[in-house]
Amino acid sequence: MNATASAAALEALEADLLLEGVARHWGFDLRSHSRPRLLRRLRRHLREERLESFSALQARVLHDSEALEGLLRALSSTPPGLFADAAFFRDFRARVVPVLRTWPSVRVWHAGCGTGEDTYALAILLHEEGLWGRCRLYASDASEGLLADARTGVLPLPGEDDARRHAESGGRGSLSDYYTRDGNWALLQPKLRDGIFFTQHNLTIDGSFNEFHVILCRDTLLSFNRALHNRVHARLYESLARFGFLCLGRKESLARTPHAAAYEELEGSGHIFRRVT
Amino acid sequence: MSVGLLVVGAPRSAGADVETLLSVLPAHLPTPVVVALHRGPHDLLAAPLGRRCALPVVEPDDKDDLVPGRVYLAPWGYHLLVDRGSVALSVEPPEHGCRPAIDALFESAADSYGAAAAALLFAGHEDGQEGLNLLQARGGRVAVVRGGSEGGEGQEGEVERLSLAEVGGWLTRLAYVARGRVQP
């Protein structure tokens, strides 16, 4: 084995030990996460923390819960702004909203909400479509730190691009009607913020906590390996009412998941599926 | 060690050269080919790039299998990482202003395939250089391709340089050289 190959093997070993330590000490099992993504995020985190090795990171994370929170935050990905994926919200308005109008009450779960950008975008959309009164919106994430950010209802001030994407998504009013400006920050309206139930929920270990008519879980499962991804899909299936909607990311598929046959994809939508059995 | 994966990175300016590369891939290629080409949200690439290619060109979904003899094109808005025989898409922030980024693909190829990966980088952008160096350090076979009519200049520094016309020969030699090389 040459020097670089042995360095690579050592790094892989240190990564395994770090993940093992975090799982056993803190109960956050990252061992079933997508390995290439995990390695890249961990390396980036090392550079930002100015640490030499995963062993050094392990020593810090095991003794310091704030360091753990920092690590979990480094491993998360949230969209850069409101309505970041305008095409999805446009499809949601066109294909899902008309069905929701026919239901007396609607429970919506945003699984993996991160710092809440998509949650608030969805809340704005439901408000614009006149559905806010009959919707209960639950948003969950495994990280308390990210949830704490989401709960504040404070986001970086939307710019022209955000306003344009909101319009592309079919937004009727002005995006700025939904927040008040405070310097470079936007404080979302209390009527939106207070109507969202933010709750800590770890998709990898926690069970189903309700039955929902709509589940948003977009690009969250990219972080998991295939086995865990399929286990989580089983849980999403259990949590979704018959004829409910499952909204995945643009490049996520149900093809190899255990309940693929129970869903129909809405034609021409960006990966919105409807549970049919 | 035989080659198990070919990764290709190219800046936007090299789109036509990538099409040429794909047209010289043999129809019975024994490895998957994964391409990270810088692109915008409205670039439809799979169909045009597949026109002259003997192999199917697809934009994979997350966690799709990597099948030999297929060309996988990184979708816009995601990094395409490889994970021992399957695709792992990621929405990490853009690198060098790009998503998909070439460095992301090459780094994952180095981790997952090491010396069994081969990489071609089309010159013209800073993205990809770091990943190429890492892959080479892990024993992978790498080369930089100069676009257009510029000639290849053999070695420049540590990395082999090719003209577009020389890529076909490089691909043919790939399996043979990699298998025959004595491990240090």
Image: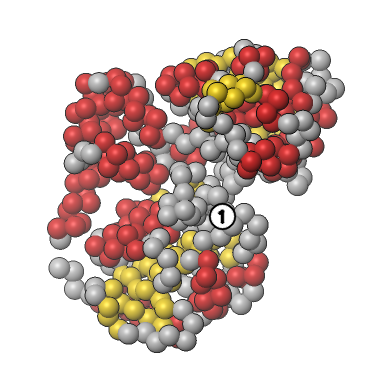
Q: Position of residue A128 (x, y in %)?
A: 77, 26
Q: Quadrant of the C terminus of chain A?
A: top right
Q: Position of residue A223 (x, y in %)?
A: 45, 38
Task: Identify whether A164 is placed above or below B84.
Answer: above
| Amino acid at the residue labelled 1 | Pro
Query: Could you tell me which residue is drawn at 25 percent across and 45 percent down?
Result: A12
The residue nearer to you, when weighing A86 against A250, is: A86
Structure colour scheme: secondary structure
Query: Could you tell me which residue is drawn at 47 percent across and 67 percent down?
Result: B10
* Number of numbered tags placed on the structure image: 1
Task: Identify whether A217 is placed above or below A138.
Answer: below
- Say what secondary structure mark 1 lies in: loop
> Residue B6 lies in what quarter of the image?
bottom left
The residue nearer to you, when weighing A273 against A277, is: A273
The residue nearer to you, when weighing B118 against A149, is: A149
Examine the rendering and report whether any part of residue A52 can be seen.
Answer: yes
Is A77 on the left-hand or right-hand side of A126? left
For label 1, the crowd category at 10 Å Cα-Cα, with few meaning under 14, some 14 to 19 and many 20 or more, is: many
Residue most extreme to the front: A183
Residue most extreme to the right: A102
Is B141 on the left-hand or right-hand side of A111? left
Q: Position of residue B88 (x, y in %)?
A: 47, 48
Q: Which residue is mark 1?
A: B75
> Residue A208 lies in what quarter of the image?
top right
Q: Quadrant of the N terminus of chain A?
A: bottom left
Query: Could you tell me which residue is drawn at 40 percent across and 69 percent down?
Result: B121
Q: Position of residue B117 (x, y in %)?
A: 35, 64
- Name the subunit of mark 1: B
Query: Could you tell me which residue is drawn at 21 percent across and 38 percent down?
Result: A51
Examine the rendering and report whether any part of residue A112 can be seen.
Answer: no
